[in-house]
Amino acid sequence: MRQALEGSQAIARAVALCRPDVVSAYPITPQTHIVENIAKLVADGELKCEYVSVESEHSAASVALGAAAAGARAYTASASQGILLMCEVLYDIAGLRIPMVLTCANRAVSAPLSIWNDHQDSMAVRDAGWIQIHCADNQEAVDTTIQAFRIAQDTDLPVMVCVDGFTLTHTLEPIELPTQQQVDDFLPPFVFARALDPRKPLSIGTMATPDWFTEARHSHHGAVLAAAEVIAAADADWQRITGRCGGGLLAVDGPDDARIGVVCMGSITGTLQDARAASPELPAARIIRLRSYRPFPAQALREACAGLDQVVVLERALAPGGVGIVGAEVRAALYGTPDAPRVQSVAAGLGGRDMPLTTYARLIALAQAEATTDFAILDVELDKLPEADRYAAAAMAGGQA
């Protein structure tokens, strides 16, 4: 049955359908509504689980780690500075190969302070060793959340489901919630073979000497790469049950004879698709949406870019002094392939700045320009730069610009 639900509410219900044993949470905008809704389901008796309200995001991740290590299906959620505060524990969870699920309601990272959406938070922990999946809309957020629990337990890896803050978390969409039976058919009971047992005490997270650390990291790297097949299989199985497909590792939309490609992640995909349909006078670009960012779908991307002359990577985060976070990985994946396209990277929508339909035309113009650049930031208003420096200085002093 289709219902009009706020994205956060829909995600909370998807989590509940997965029958978690432990949910630990600390509120932070724009993630708060997710755990608020889960808390209400617990309080109303609709969800039987241990809901732990903690004093910080570091504690939320720590509780989830301990619960999952003891054999419980565990979940938490966070955003922005909360993800950064969790960072130490996120590395621990992944390095210990603990299966659990976290929703990242993507939000810009300060300073300056911003509560609006970009991908700086999930990009900041991209190398922590988590599987990382980005959703284009709230229906996909629901479906991916359910898939994430199975992917985690099939890989013994934690899964981060990324949804654009406010753009998805706080908007109403018609959502098709699966039935409990459909979820139960898809998601088996949680069994963690390495679960801690007081009858057989042991220590985890102990020191690895230089003789073993490299092998441990190599094993972890291989496990994340191998997770690509599990992600694709989970999405295919979910499609057989519900008729809905998230796109596997990446989704390709556009003509086979396109010469320009746009690579993106998250909710901007819909804007670009709408703009392309409304702009028949412009070349129809092939829009390539990365659903799985970790593992990075290099082979699938090479296939998706076949026949393209130009690829523009639309970044939702910034590596100051660098050449684009996602763009660098796209270049690496395409390097050495026959007739590899030229890759340009642009950052846009930082701190929640609007990306209207005209963004598509600007990306096409960038691809067609004779003079190209490896990296650029869209929508910089040059006359504001001196004031921006003054604003930053005032913010450091605790005053107003």
Image (cartoon, rainbow, N blue to C red):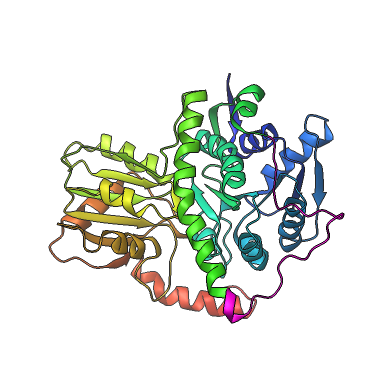
The residue under the point 44% across, 32% down is: 245
The residue under the point 60% across, 24% down is: 182
Which image quarter holds the C terminus?
A: bottom right
| Residue 226, position as x, y percentages in the image | 47, 52
Side of 159 where 353 appears, left or right: left
Is residue 321 in the magenta section?
Answer: no
Residue sitting nearer the eye, 47 or 43 = 47
Residue sitting nearer the eye, 244 or 136 = 244
* Whether residue 51 is situated above or below residue 181 in the rendered picture: below
Residue 164 visible within the image: no
Instruction: Point out the stretch of residues depicted in magenta.
Output: 189-212
* Whether residue 322 is situated above or below residue 281 in the rendered picture: below
Q: How many marks?
A: 0
Is residue 194 in the magenta section?
Answer: yes
Q: Name which quarter of the figure residue 61 lies in.
A: bottom right
Residue 178 visible within the image: yes
The kind of secondary structure the magenta stretch mainly shows is loop
* Whether residue 324 is situated above or below residue 242 in the rendered picture: below
| Residue 334, position as x, y percentages in the image | 26, 59
The residue under the point 26% across, 53% down is: 363
Side of 169 where 190 appears, left or right: right
| Residue 138, position as x, y percentages in the image | 53, 36
